[in-house]
Amino acid sequence: MLLYEVPLELNTLYMRYERLLDSTIGEITPEVEALEAEISTYLAASADKVEAAAMVLRNLEADRVAADSEAKRLANRAKSIEHNIDRLKALMLMAVKKIGKIKTPRFTIYLQKSKDTVSYSMSPDIMPDVFAAMYPDFSRVIIELNKTAVQEFAKAGNVVPPEIIATEKEGTEFLRIS
């Protein structure tokens, strides 16, 4: 059931558009561009048609909310199943430790241990710069641009050094429906 009664013509155009995008896997082909132009021309014909597009938009937003809700439900279900898998594996591991290797017509179940590993970290009692001076082969320094400091420097009216590349990005226009 639709949230609003929408003119059939616009709904049909949009359904064609969705099917075409699905068939091209999101690629913008000449057919997609032609259909976008057809929808744009249709919408430009009157304010009623733009209002109808707003109704379709609200329907799509409601569909998205429903899909998000279902995705969260399925993610929770997958997490629950994963916990069940882990618990069953732990129980099987205890059994195989007691019984030993198990051979059946379908499975061979046994224990296998991975190689022991060693992990290293720097002691919290030593300052990183002292550590780097004592063990230069065991340390490295990461230098990166402090973008916040550069932005504040530029906002204060200072000239940004030529070694810093500033890329301007034009603001995005977006549709508001209230």
Image (spheres, rainbow, N blue to C red):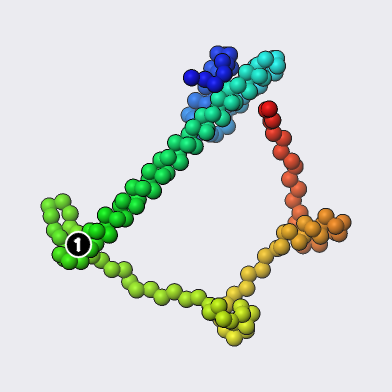
Residue for point 45% across, 41% down: 72
How many numbered marks have been drawn onto this rendered protein structure? 1
Please determine whether, in this image, residue 143 is positioned above or below residue 52: below
Task: Point out residue 165 in the picture as x, y percentages from the top left corner.
Answer: 75, 56
Mark 1 Cα-neighbour bin, 10 Å: few <14, some 14–19, many ≥20 = few
Please state if 50 lies on the left or on the right of 152 as rendered.
left
Residue for point 59% across, 86% down: 134
For badge 1, the amino acid type reads Ala
Asked which secondary structure carries label 1, the reply is helix
Task: Point out residue 73 in the picture as x, y percentages from the top left corner.
Answer: 42, 40
Please determine whether, in this image, residue 66 is positioned above or below residue 161: above
Please state if 16 lies on the left or on the right of 53 as rendered.
left
Q: What residue sits right under mark 1 in the picture?
A: 95
Residue 31 or residue 69, whichever sits in front: 69
Q: Is residue 90 visible?
A: yes
Residue for point 73% across, 45% down: 169
For the C terminus, which image quadrant?
top right
Task: Point out residue 87 in the picture as x, y percentages from the top left corner.
Answer: 29, 55
Residue 104 or residue 80, whichever sits in front: 80
Q: Is residue 16 visible?
A: no
Residue for point 62% across, 73% down: 141
Please determine whether, in this image, residue 175 is positioned above or below residue 86: above
Residue 116 sits in quarter: bottom left
Extreme-bottom residue of the structure: 134
Residue 17 sits in quarter: top right
Task: Point out residue 77 in the picture as x, y percentages from the top left corner.
Answer: 38, 43
Residue 53 or residue 95, whichever sits in front: 95
